[in-house]
Image (cartoon, helix red, strand yellow):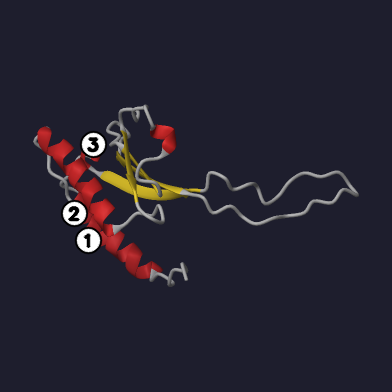
Amino acid sequence: SGEGAAADVNGVEQWQNGQLKNILEDYAPDDIFNMDESALFFKLLPDKTLAFKGETCTGGKHAKDRISVAFCVNMTGTDKTPLLVIGKSAKPRCFKGARLPSGVIYRSNTKAWMTAKLFEEYVRLIDRRLRLRTEELLV
């Protein structure tokens, strides 16, 4: 259904202040990374608008065309890993004859969602980058 279950706020807080704090104290802020993903509905129009008094405004169907984007950066913001963009098309027409900008990785699947396989590939890529600098990734 896409709905998340209620989280045990006290348990999370205790874990953050206890175990997580103990794990992270051995690492410098430059070596602590956060990764998140977000959906970008690139054809979705606003659901609200300004209208003059007496004017009517009718809605329509919501566009569901999307890409997913994953971001990963260290705690100080000095090390930004490549951006992972996930679309539906394996070879988008807009890419024909074009090269992706450096720092952008494009992958695809039928729903343009992050999957376990894509996540693992992305984490392994970040790990390889860090190992080149003789650093290791703690997941």
The image shows residue 45 at horizontal and vertical percentages of 63, 46
Q: Are marks 3 and 2 in contact (CB under 8 Å)?
A: no
Amino acid type indicated by mark 2: Ile
Q: Residue at x 52, y 48 (%)?
A: 41
Tell which circle, 3 or 2, labels the residue nearer the N-terminal end. 2
Residue at screen point 16% across, 46% down: 137
In front of the other: 89 or 49: 89
Q: Amino acid at mark 3?
A: Asp
- Residue type at mark 1 is Gln
CA separation in Å, label 2 and label 1:
6 Å
Residue situated in front as seen by the camera: 55 or 111:
111
Q: Which residue is mark 3?
A: 30
Q: Nearer the viewer, residue 59 or 82?
A: 59
> What residue is rendered at 29% in x and 31% in y?
78
Evaluate if marks 2 and 1 touch, with contact meaning CB atoms under 8 Å apart. yes
Q: Position of residue 122 (x, y in %)?
A: 25, 46
Residue 23 marker: 2
Q: CA distance from mark 3 to mark 1?
A: 20 Å
Nearer-the-camera pick, 16 or 42: 42
Vertical relation: 60 (above or below) 73: below
Q: Secondary structure at mark 1?
A: helix
Q: Using the image, determine if residue 11 lies above or below residue 92.
A: below
Q: Which mark is residue 69?
A: none
Residue indicated by mark 1: 19
Q: Residue at x 30, y 28 (%)?
A: 102
Q: How many marks?
A: 3
Q: Position of residue 75 (x, y in %)?
A: 30, 40
Q: Position of residue 58 (x, y in %)?
A: 77, 54
Q: Residue furthest right?
A: 54
Residue 104, by quadrant, is top left
